[in-house]
Image: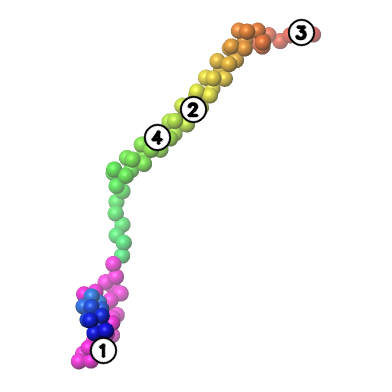
Amino acid sequence: MKTHLGFIRKYTSMLGFEIFPDFATDFTSFQQISKMAGSRVAHATLKGPSVVKELCIGMALALAAGSLWKMHHWNEQRKVRQFYDLLEKGEISVVVQEE
């Protein structure tokens, strides 16, 4: 148990506070150290945008949008080709029949 306490004391003192203060130190210094510990908590630092990440995301989105646009045009081209094939066969007509 003594080795675990030594390990905890060593690493908590590196952070600026002690969980188990020695009895040789007075209690007020322990309170002062533990109050200061809040300012030493490591927070996530905000970084700027990653250029490589932004380029990869942009290329992926452009590729997805471009493929959707191309599929739309292929579909429209198929409809137009089908219309002219039917018109050529005489199955449909663009002239209105009089009755």
In the rendered image of this protein, does residue 77 appear above or below residue 66?
A: above
Circle nearer the N terminus (2, 3): 2
Q: Which residues are magenta?
A: 14-42
Q: Which mark is residue 98?
A: 3
- State if disc 1 and disc 4 touch (CB < 8 Å): no
- Characterize the local packing of mark 1: few (<14), some (14-19) or many (20 or more) Cα atoms within 10 angstroms: few
Q: Nearer the viewer, mark 2 or mark 4?
A: 2
To which residue does mark 2 refer? 71
> Which amino acid is tagged 4?
Ala
Circle nearer the N terminus (4, 1): 1
Question: Residue at the spot x=29%, y=54% of the render?
Answer: 47
In the rendered image of this protein, does residue 30 appear above or below residue 49?
A: below
In terms of secondary structure, where does tag 4 sit? helix
> Is 95 on the left-hand or right-hand side of 49?
right
- Characterize the local packing of mark 3: few (<14), some (14-19) or many (20 or more) Cα atoms within 10 angstroms: few
Q: Which mark is residue 28?
A: 1
- Measured Cα–Cα span from mark 4 to mark 1: 62 Å
Q: Which mark is residue 62?
A: 4
Measured from the top left, where is residue 69 in percent x and y? 47, 29
